[in-house]
Amino acid sequence: MASALLSGAKYSDGLTIVGISMCTAVICEAISWLLIYRTASYKSLKSTIDKASKKLETMKTTDGNTVSSNLLKKSSKIKKIDRVETSLKESSRDLSMFKFKSGAVVAVILFMVFGLLNSLFEGKPVAKIPFVPIRLVQKMSHRGLPGDDMTDCSMAFLYLLCSISIRTNLQKFLGFSPPRGAAGAGFFPMPDPKSS
């Protein structure tokens, strides 16, 4: 009965994609919790990163506030900061490697769901975009759709947008976002100012 109600609705395909994306995000986060977040080694690495980032932050703020004329004290402080930064980078790298096994399982699930949705909604617009997007976005949003109406939205584009936004917000809500000191954990890590 519920499917009969949804099939008659104007936005049923789009809502189906959003619902499946939400379910997939919940399943992926449950798998990540089972394989990563509940383990003692993850908790240990996360606390190590948090402590190191706080220590580095306090060392850098106290370094900027005190004006020391003794060059020896300043060089030892720089060496301590470098040691803490190195430790932080190593812990972040270890955390990334630890998350890799869960990432592989999640990727397989996401590819399977994407393949299923692609076969169900192939060549069928699932939503309307309220404007004509720029050329680069048009190639993604109109992928695999017949016709010249660039406001039609394909399943792949809607699923991509939903997956990115829902999963990221779900991670923040559940407290599974990366530690704040793990700056290199993202796709675009901050460059090291000393190396340039």
Image (spheres, rainbow, N blue to C red):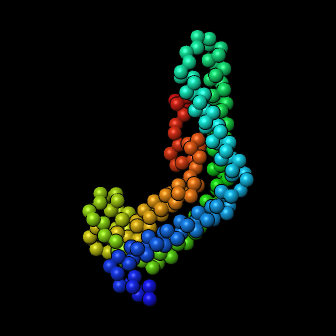
Residue furthest right in the image: 40
Residue at image location 44% in from the left, 89% down from the top: 1
Q: Nearer the viewer, residue 106 or 6?
A: 6
Residue at image location 53% in from the left, 55% down from the top: 172
Residue 163 position in % (x across, y down):
48, 63
Residue 41 position in % (x across, y down):
72, 51
Above or below 101: residue 96: above
Residue at image location 53% in from the left, 69% down from the top: 24
Residue at image location 38% in from the left, 78% down from the top: 12
Residue 135 position in % (x across, y down):
30, 58
Above or below 34: residue 41: above
Horizontal side of 165 relative to 37 (left or right) equals left
Q: How many marks?
A: 0
Q: Is residue 91 visible?
A: no
Residue furthest top in the image: 69
Q: Is residue 147 visible?
A: yes
Residue 14 position in % (x across, y down):
39, 73
Above or below 59: residue 161: below
